[in-house]
Structure formats: C-alpha cells, structure tokens
C-alpha cells in the first residue's frame, strides 16, 4: 500500500544535509541528563530509536551556567558535557540520520537555586506563575536587567556553545532557541522588553540581539548549519504581544537575509494562543522569505498530525514538520508513516518530563515496524 503522506516522506536537501524525508524530531525538555548537565548513556538509545535518515533536534541544551535553569537538562558549555554528546551523535550518524543541537538559555523562566547565579532577562519583569527548580516549584524571582556587558557575554556564550556542538561534539547543525519566552524572546517581544538603551524600545533595537547572536554563531559555523526557533503565536512563558505580526516578519526577514539553514516556526496553537493579534502562519513566513529571495528553509511545529503535515508541505507553505509528543510515544514514527500504521496516542500525563523516571517513559515505548 502506498503511503498516504508522499510529500512528508519525500527527500529534502537542508543546507549540506540530504534528508530522506521531511519528518523532524522536535526539541523537547526530557530532563534525562545528570544534575550537572552531562548527557546520560541511555540518551543515546533514545535518539538512536528515532533516527530514520532524517533530522533530529536535541532537548534544549544549556549554553552556560547562568542559563542552567532546568535541572537535569543537558549542557554543551563544559568539556565533560561535550564528551558525553559524542557517542550520541555518532550513533545517530550510524543510522544514516542527522542531529542538531538546540542552544538554550532560560532567562527569567528559572530560579537561582538551580544555576547558583542571579537570573537575568531583557527587563526586570518577573513571571506571575511559579518556576521549576532543582528543589521543586518556587515563586518567581525578579530578573536582573541584563547589562550591556552581560549581553556581550550572552552573545559570546551562544557562539562558544555553537562551536562546541559543531567542532567538538560533531553535531550536524545547531538551533538557536529564540522561542517560548526564554532569554532571546524576552528581548524581542515588546511585552517583556521595556529597556531604554540600544536593545529596547524600537523594533530595530529589540531585533538587535537576535541579529548579533546569529552573526556570532555564524562567525565560525557555516550559516547553512544554523537554525533559529520562534514562537509568534505562543503564550508559553507568559508571552504574547500585540505587534507580533510586525515583529516576527522582521525576524524572518533578518534571518532570511543571512540565509541560515532554517527557521523553526511554532505556528501551531497547542501550547496556547495569546490572541493579541492574528495568528502567524507558515504561509506568511514563506511569503516573507520569498520576498527576500532567501534560501532559508521552514520547519512547522506544534500539534501536527500526518494529514495536516502532509497538507502544509504539499501546498508549499513549509519544507519540513517537527513532531514532539507523537515522536516520543512512536519511536518508529517514520516507519509508521511509510506503512500507514496508526500512531500510538499520548495518554494523559505519563511522566514524559520526569527526570526521576530515568529510562521509564523514555526509551521503553514499543515500535510497530
């Protein structure tokens, strides 16, 4: 029987990578590293299970001690962390697949008890809800407004992490995490940036740190090995701004002019929609890139089914689709698509993010193919 998703399963050249299909493993926060951010051995099996000559994106991977706000998340800023990533990357390559390292700094969505350092953000605007920490949920702290020197260091941290990932750990690509209310998103969105200096106020100023981070990352890493993630519709992290259409069109133009490998757009509303402006669509993102004459590819994400993913690719609105929770419980997701086998469903809260579970609910989901 022919597959019902021929476009989703068609080949695609992403930068230097020749992908056999357009199914991407979305970055997620599984929390299976050590308390010092060192990837654990069974993380190798997790990625190996899901490798199908496609692109896998790692968990959010911390770029510095300052940004270490999710306990048991992996890091890429120290040599012991880098060393632990090497066999994981090699295992993915042996399966004929490729892997990108998502570079992450949590900004205000963290507590100093986890990092041991003061929390920072674009502006001293705290979250309203509680934050996760190594000691459980805690009331939020007021973040320090990052100084100009602090911004310079943050930019350098992203660049160093990218170089560690590509040149030391052997990753194929890096993805800068600019979404979901983390450090870069708080600079970009007007609702969380009330600065009075060159990094705040106007859209041009709010965009500055995004451009400087990408320019630093691409200083020693080819642009066609770099991705950037955005969440123009999302309310996660208490985000959302009335001017997000204008803001994120500007982001896409800036990234498209740099011809990075891809922009990862969280266009789905599965994490909630801020309702402060119209929905930002993949079609709009594509149009902006075409206006710039850019070679940058698009990845859509959040809440996609096989049918909706096939439709967006067939209509030319995106190049690839990233799957999150479905790919957790269906390690053979590509094989199921190829053979038209129904997907196992995510049932309730099964501890997908519970680091204490270890291998449970992590590498024990059965394959059907």
Image (cartoon, helix red, strand yellow):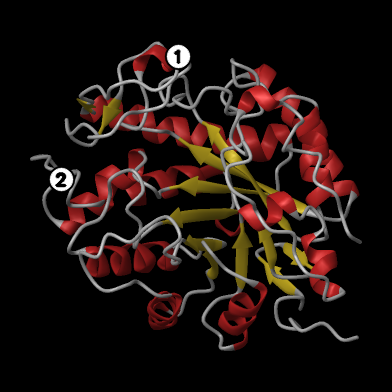
State the SS at label 2: loop
| Residue plotted at (88% across, 59% down) | 368
Position of residue 139 in the picture relative to residue 173 (left or right): left
Left or right of 351 in this view: 94:
right
Residue drawn 53% across the image and 55% down it? 227
- Label 1: how many Cα within 10 Å (few below 14, some 14–19, many 20+): few
Dot 2 crowding, Cα within 10 Å, few <14, some 14–19, many 20+: many
How much space separates mark 1 and mark 2, taking CA atoms?
A: 34 Å
Q: Give the residue at mark 2.
A: 200
In the figure, residue 69 lies in which quadrant?
Answer: top left
Image quadrant for the C terminus?
bottom right
Residue 207 in the image: state x and y as whole percent: 27, 53
Q: Residue at x 49, y 62 (%)?
A: 263
Earlier-in-chain disc, 1 versus 2: 1
| Circle 1: element type | loop
Residue 282 visible, this orientation:
yes
Question: Relative to 119, does residue 350 appear above or below in the rendering?
Answer: below
Q: Quadrant of the N terminus?
A: bottom right
Name, please, the residue furthest toward the left: 196
Q: Position of residue 101 (x, y in %)?
A: 62, 43
Residue of label 1: 135
Single out the residue that lies furthest toward the front. Answer: 348
Q: On the image, which quarter does residue 336 sit in?
A: bottom right
Quadrant in which residue 18 is drawn: bottom right
List x then y, in percent, for residue 136.
Answer: 44, 19
């Amino acid at each position: 029987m022919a597959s019902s998703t021929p476009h989703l399963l068609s080949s695609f050249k992403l930068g230097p990578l020749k992908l056999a299909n357009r199914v991407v493993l979305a970055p997620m926060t599984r929390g299976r590293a050590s308390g010092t951010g060192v990837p654990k051995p069974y993380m190798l099996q997790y990625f190996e299970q899901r490798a199908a000559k496609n692109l896998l994106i790692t968990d959010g991977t911390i770029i510095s001690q300052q940004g270490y706000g999710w306990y048991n998340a992996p890091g890429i800023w120290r040599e012991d962390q880098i060393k632990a990533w090497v066999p994981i990357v090699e295992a993915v390559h042996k399966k004929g697949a490729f892997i990108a390292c998502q570079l992450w700094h949590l900004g205000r969505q963290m507590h100093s008890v986890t990092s041991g350092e003061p929390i920072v953000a674009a502006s001293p605007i705290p979250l309203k809800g509680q934050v996760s920490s190594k000691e459980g949920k805690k009331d939020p702290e007021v973040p320090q407004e990052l100084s100009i020197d602090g911004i310079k260091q943050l930019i350098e941290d992203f660049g160093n992490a990218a170089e560690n990932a590509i040149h030391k750990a052997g990753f194929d690509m890096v993805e800068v995490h600019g979404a979901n209310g983390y450090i870069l998103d708080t600079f970009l969105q007007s609702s969380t940036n009330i600065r009075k200096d060159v990094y705040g106020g106007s859209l041009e100023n709010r965009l500055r740190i995004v451009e400087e981070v990408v320019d630093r990352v691409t200083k020693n890493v080819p642009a066609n090995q770099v991705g950037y993630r955005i969440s123009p519709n999302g309310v996660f992290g208490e985000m959302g701004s009335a001017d997000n259409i204008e803001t994120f069109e500007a982001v896409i133009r800036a990234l498209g002019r740099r011809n990075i490998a891809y922009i990862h757009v969280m266009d789905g509303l599965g994490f909630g929609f801020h309702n402060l402006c119209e929905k930002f669509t993949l079609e709009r993102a594509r149009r902006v890139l075409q206006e710039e004459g850019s070679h940058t590819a698009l990845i859509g994400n959040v809440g996609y089914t096989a049918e909706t993913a096939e439709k967006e690719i067939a209509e030319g609105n995106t190049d690839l689709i990233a799957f999150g929770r479905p790919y957790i419980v269906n390690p053979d997701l590509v094989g199921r698509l190829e053979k038209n086998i129904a997907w196992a469903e995510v049932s309730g809260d099964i501890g997908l993010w519970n680091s204490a579970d270890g291998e449970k609910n992590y590498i024990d989901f059965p394959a059907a193919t």
